[in-house]
Image (cartoon, helix red, strand yellow):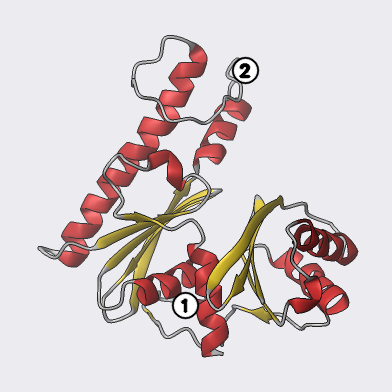
Amino acid sequence: MKLCLDVGNSHIYGGVYTSGEARLTFRKSSIMGSSSDEYGLFLRSVLRENDLDPMAVSEIALCSVVPEMVYAISAACQKYFDIRPFILQAGVKTGLKIQYRNPLEVGADRIANAMAGTQLYPGENLIIIDLGTATTLCVVGKERTYRGGIILPGLRMSMQALESGTSKLRSVEIIRRDVCLGKTTAESIQSGLFYGHLGALQEIMQQIREEEFGDQQPKVIATGGFASLFGGVGIFDQVVPDLVLQGLLVALELN
């Protein structure tokens, strides 16, 4: 079995794979300052609670946008699984041609998404949208060229900005609103979050198509915790919840 971990700002997203097939995916809140023992005990317990033997894990891969957590999780893998994890970082093989002015600036999770996308849809132009703490859009050419991307605040971050920057607005549940006009303060915030983000995504994708692809129609892949919120509105071709974990599997094979 292979254990893949995406260590993000809000959550640790993990998956267990056998022969490329997912047997388990799970999420845990990211808590800065947690010890390697806390991570190790959590990982072993989540496997056992899902009838998987921790000792059957043969490889571990991780990527992270939170460098401070990498050491503790790496130490946990070595202590509790006796495995030195593969870390997707600068210098490893990706199979991508990165056209960022400074390739080191591209987040490891975005690289993993691009690697998985090019394997799932070889020979196609791609727009990959990851709706997490931040919302990112990555543009990948059919020749496996990572052309660039866009980053904007995610839905939860936008809601937190409203709460912290005003005296009367409070946090609300982030949901999909079928009617745009809100009749309460909570509904008004929910509509603003949902339709504001939807409008931003539509405009950005239109600009990307015009600037990068002309009359060619790229395939749009969505992933991340909020991707399902926008399913069925016609802006995605495919929602792949574990895209980043699939990218880590690809990286393991290449390296």
Left or right of residue 74: residue 213: left
Q: Residue at x 27, y 81 (%)?
A: 143
Q: Secondary structure at mark 2?
A: loop
* Image quadrant in which you'd find residue 77: bottom right
* Image quadrant in which you'd find residue 16: bottom right
* Image quadrant in which you'd find residue 68: bottom right
Q: Residue at x 78, y 56 (%)?
A: 49
Q: Quadrant of the N terminus?
A: bottom right
Instruction: Name the amino acid, label 2.
Output: Ser
Mark 1 crowdedness (10 Å alpha carbons): few <14, some 14-19, many ≥20: few
Residue 220: where, in percent of width, then height?
Answer: 30, 58
Q: Residue at x 30, y 39 (%)?
A: 233
**Residue 140 visible in the snapshot:** yes
Question: How many marks can you see?
Answer: 2
Q: Is residue 28 above or below residue 143?
A: above
Foreground of the two, 221 or 15: 15
Instruction: Name the amino acid, label 1.
Output: Pro
Query: Separation of disc 2 and disc 1 at Cα?
Result: 41 Å
Mark 2 crowdedness (10 Å alpha carbons): few <14, some 14-19, many ≥20: few
Left or right of residue 225: residue 73: right
Left or right of residue 63: residue 137: left
Residue 218: where, in percent of width, then height?
Answer: 23, 63
Q: Secondary structure at mark 1?
A: helix
Q: Earlier in the sequence, mark 2 or mark 1?
A: 1
Q: Residue at x 46, y 25 (%)?
A: 190
Residue 140: where, in percent of width, then height?
Answer: 32, 71
Task: Tell me the residue that label 2 is attached to.
Answer: 167
Task: Tell me the residue that label 1 is attached to.
Answer: 103
Residue lying furthest top: 183
Residue 131: where, in percent of width, then height?
Answer: 47, 49
Residue lying furthest left: 215
